[in-house]
Amino acid sequence: MRTETINYAVDGNEHQGHLAIDEAVDGPRPAILVCHEGPGLGTHERDVCERLASLGYVAFALDYHGGGGRLSRAEAMARLADLRTDADRIRRLGRAGLDVLLDQAQADTNRVAAIGYCFGGTMALELGRAGVDLKAIVGFHSGLGTPRPDDAANISGSVLVNIGADDPIIPPDQRAEFEAEMRAGSVDWQMLLLGGVVHSFTNPDASKAEMPTVIAYDEAADRRSWAAMLGLFADTLG
């Protein structure tokens, strides 16, 4: 397994992503862009990249805040409040990370997917709405809203979102709006709704926030949503 920190620039700012490649695998292989949770690129997303690489993918975790580190909860919330209404910037940040991934010799540019956690899921969806050729888009406890719902018609790949049924950050009305958006855009989509589960259910460190009714790890939901993602990859990436 080879891992590497890659520096790249977006709008004049330095960003630091995490690349993982299993060099025992020969030739090009499907490429997976990983978009991190709201606080920033951390151990969770790096582990996801390496887990994907061990399964025969090339994976790159982008850094949409810049600097490669983590923000405090207050800092992250302030940044995301500004970012979530600016679809153009979300898409530029996502596209810059995707360009790094596709620049790798091992990346099969015809078999590309984007996955994301929390606001990273929002970013993966926005790349699809921008018309980027993604065979699969997967969100885990992802924000579903967008300032440009009509752009769902540009999504060419298959979409899977994994959402906790009790997640107060992604409430039922946001889920309903997303369903209407996907239908209007004639998207191939599915939603895995996980009962009794709240936000950040894939991150083993989530329970450290001590906000169990809002943010908490759930081992079963983590396992089931990962399996759902791999099933979609089998259908779309080969």
Image (cartoon, rainbow, N blue to C red):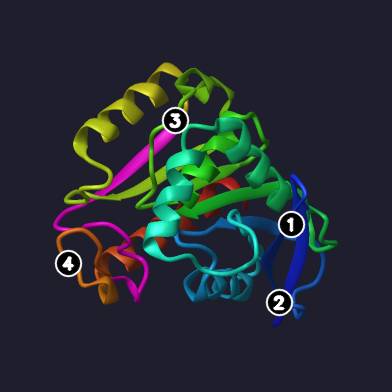
- Give the labeled residue for mark 1: 101
Q: Secondary structure at mark 4?
A: loop
Q: Which residues are magenta?
A: 188-206
The Cα atoms of the two marked residues, 4 and 3, are separated by 27 Å
For badge 4, the amino acid type reads Pro
**What residue did someone put label 2 on?**
22
Q: Position of residue 235 (x, y in %)?
A: 53, 48
**From mark 4 to mark 1, how far is it between C-alphas?**
35 Å
User: Where in the figure is residue 159, as x and y percent of width and height?
Assistant: 47, 39
Query: Dots 3 and 1: beta carbons under 8 Å?
Result: no
Indicate the amino acid at tag 3: Thr
Q: CA distance from mark 2 to mark 3?
A: 35 Å
Of the numbered discs 4 and 3, the one sitting upstream in the chain is 3
User: Does the CB distance between marks 4 and 1 fall below 8 Å?
Assistant: no
Residue 83 lies, in percent from the top left, at: 51, 40
Judged left or right of residue 136, residue 210 is left
According to the picture, the residue beneath numbered tag 3 turns out to be: 146
- Residue under numbered circle 4: 212
Q: Is residue 16 left or right of residue 138?
A: right
Instruction: Give the residue at x 35% y 52%.
Output: 141
Task: Say which quadrant the N terminus sits in.
Answer: bottom right
Left or right: 41 in relation to 203: right
- The residues tagged by marks 3 and 1 sit, at their Cα atoms, a distance apart of 25 Å
Q: Nearer the viewer, residue 192 or 89?
A: 89
